[in-house]
Amino acid sequence: PGANRDDGVATAAALASSKSLGKLVELDLNYRDIGDEGLRILANSKAFPALRRLKVAACGLTIRGVKVPLAYWKVLAWK
């Protein structure tokens, strides 16, 4: 992980700590290098109660990193 991954994780952390995204239905993070760590941060956040679609193409995710968030976000359509 380099600077792009660090920036991606920082972006995920900023989104996860937001108090104003409660009505967000779709979040497009395609090509934002959040990696497994960033996805874990988002999955553990309560900032997105209305989220139904999370786009994470080319985000540096691994199968291992996706398994746990999938358990939390069963209703999401992953793209």
Image: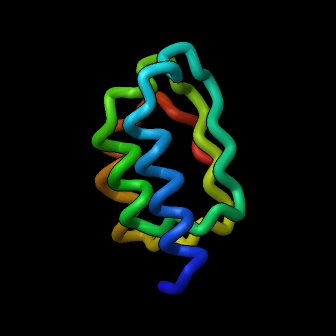
Badge count: 0
Colouring scheme, one of rainbow, by chain, secondary structure, one colour: rainbow
Q: Which of 31 and 14 is in front in this view?
A: 14
Q: Residue furthest bottom?
A: 2
Q: Nearer the viewer, residue 77 or 42?
A: 42
Residue 7 spot, x, y in % from top left:
55, 66
Q: Which residue lies furthest to the top in this view?
A: 23
Answer above or below: position of 17 versus 25: below
Q: Which of 63 and 18 is in front in this view?
A: 18
Residue shown at 41% from the left, 49% from the top:
13
Residue 36 spot, x, y in % from top left:
41, 66
Answer above or below: position of 78 versus 20: below
Residue 15 spot, x, y in % from top left:
49, 40
Horizontal arrangement in the rendering, residue 57 relative to residue 46 (left or right): right
Horizontal arrangement in the rendering, residue 36 relative to residue 54 (left or right): left
Residue shown at 52% from the left, 33% from the top:
76
Residue shown at 70% from the left, 56% from the top:
30
Residue 35 spot, x, y in % from top left:
48, 68
Horizontal arrangement in the rendering, residue 66 relative to residue 46 (left or right): right
Residue shown at 34% from the left, 51% from the top:
41
Q: Nearer the viewer, residue 12 or 31?
A: 12
Q: In which quarter of the image is residue 28?
A: top right
Answer above or below: position of 40 versus 76: below
